[in-house]
Image: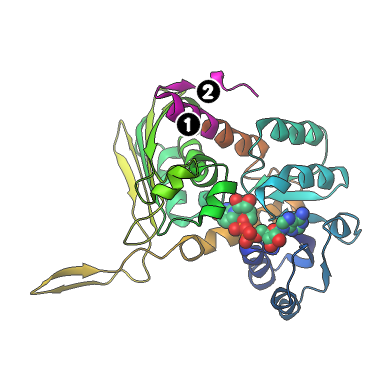
């Protein structure tokens, strides 16, 4: 049995805790820490069977019963807590991004070198059943050499301005999943990025120094070309699609819906909207990524999403930001750590 401590009892901390307690027989959430734990969250912990509740995450790091931690706190805390956890010998599952600061990610990498500790990054979309099927078609050679990747990734609603201001910008907060998806589907590194974007959903997002709409073109080491389109607000819900086109054919996945019913009448043909947001669309993938983390800890095998997989999308996001600011293609080699 792998004993897990969860650091940060917010949205994603709760998702992971419920996944483990309800769906992962080989693991248990033994403790949870959050400095802003309220009575409702305490009740939720007890109802779930989590016995140790703390304000300070160090209680988890110092607890000999805990084998692994899941860092689900605010982004600005991930790197420092990761380093402390590695030094305490705890296996780490760190939510994305490891940090908005490339130097900090390199510090974590240094501390991890030679350590027996497992370190997995929370790029859950790799474990989504649709994207797994796309990946399988690419890796088994069905579509031949990859020439074009197209990713549509649009949220159903824009976040609050307070969130926007602390998010590090749309590329680091939202597109980071799509950058990871391009690497995952192609198994190739990005060499150049060209991004255009604006705040078309909410001008206040522009005033806050960010964008809410973008098209990003990526050139890959293999020569393949990828294009990502992002919006913070699609009126019809969470729009998550991908297509990979190659020398022998193409593979594409569309949105998940509650049912696949299509109702045809004299007025027209109607089907359901996409599942509302990431908690609905990706719930199974959250369970699957943690199941694989637990397995890597139990069997002492490689984690499926390692620290380099955590670093590269941050590097791409930095290049995209520079491209947007300077209205030009930016090579990844230009991004100095
Ligand atoms: N993989 C995904 O799809 C996904 C989805 C949502 C969030 N995330 C990531 O997870 C992280 C948290 O996001 P969220 O939406 O759950 O945010 P949230 O604000 O709902 O929760 C964050 C929690 O961390 C707590 N916290 C802050 N500092 C802490 C500390 N030092 N020790 C312990 N707890 C601390 C806060 O009190 C809060 O309860 C972010 O980095 C975000 O990027 C990933």
* Front one among 153 and 231: 231
Q: Is residue 61 left or right of residue 206?
A: right
Residue marked by disc 1: 320
> Label 1 to label 2, Cα distance in Å?
9 Å
Give residue 310's position: percent from left, percent from top. Answer: 62, 39
Look at the numbered disc 1 and give the secondary structure of its residue: helix
* Front one among 178 and 320: 320
| Image quadrant containing the N terminus | bottom right
Q: Residue at x 32, y 66 (%)?
A: 273
Residue marked by disc 2: 332
Magenta highlight: main SS: helix
Magenta span of residues: 317-337
Give residue 45's position: percent from left, percent from top. Answer: 73, 74
Q: Is residue 249 left or right of residue 97?
A: left
Q: Are marks 1 and 2 in contact (CB under 8 Å)?
A: no
Residue 290, by quadrant, is: bottom right
């Amino acid at each position: 049995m792998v004993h897990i401590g969860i650091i940060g009892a917010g949205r994603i901390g709760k998702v992971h805790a419920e996944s483990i307690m309800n769906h992962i027989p080989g693991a248990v959430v033994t403790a949870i820490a959050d400095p802003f734990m309220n009575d409702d969250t305490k009740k939720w912990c007890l109802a779930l069977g989590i016995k140790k509740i703390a304000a300070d995450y160090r209680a988890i790091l110092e607890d000999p019963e805990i084998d692994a931690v899941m860092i689900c706190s605010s982004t600005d805390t991930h790197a420092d807590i990761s380093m402390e956890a590695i030094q305490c010998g705890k296996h780490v599952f760190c939510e994305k991004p490891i940090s908005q600061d490339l130097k900090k990610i390199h510090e974590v990498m240094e501390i991890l070198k030679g350590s027996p500790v497992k370190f997995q990054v929370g790029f859950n979309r790799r474990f989504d059943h649709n994207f797994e099927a796309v990946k399988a078609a690419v890796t088994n050679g069905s579509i031949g050499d990859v020439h074009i990747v197209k990713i549509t990734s649009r949220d159903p609603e824009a976040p609050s301005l307070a969130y926007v201001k602390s998010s590090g910008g749309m590329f680091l907060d939202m597109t980071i999943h799509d950058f990871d998806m391009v690497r995952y589907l192609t198994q190739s590194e990005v060499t150049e990025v060209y991004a255009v974007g604006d705040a078309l959903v909410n001008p206040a997002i522009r005033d806050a120094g960010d964008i809410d709409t973008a098209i990003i073109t990526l050139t890959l080491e293999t020569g393949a070309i990828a294009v990502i389109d992002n919006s913070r607000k699609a009126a019809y819900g969470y729009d998550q699609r991908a297509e990979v086109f190659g020398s022998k054919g193409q593979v594409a996945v569309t949105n998940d819906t509650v049912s696949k019913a299509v109702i045809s009448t004299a007025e027209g043909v109607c089907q359901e909207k996409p599942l509302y947001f990431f908690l609905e669309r990706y719930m199974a993938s959250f369970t699957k990524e943690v199941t694989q983390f637990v397995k890597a800890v139990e069997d002492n095998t490689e984690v499926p999403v390692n620290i380099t997989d955590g670093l590269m999308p941050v590097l791409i996001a930095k290049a995209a930001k520079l491209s947007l600011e300077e209205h030009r293609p930016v090579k990844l080699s230009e991004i100095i750590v």
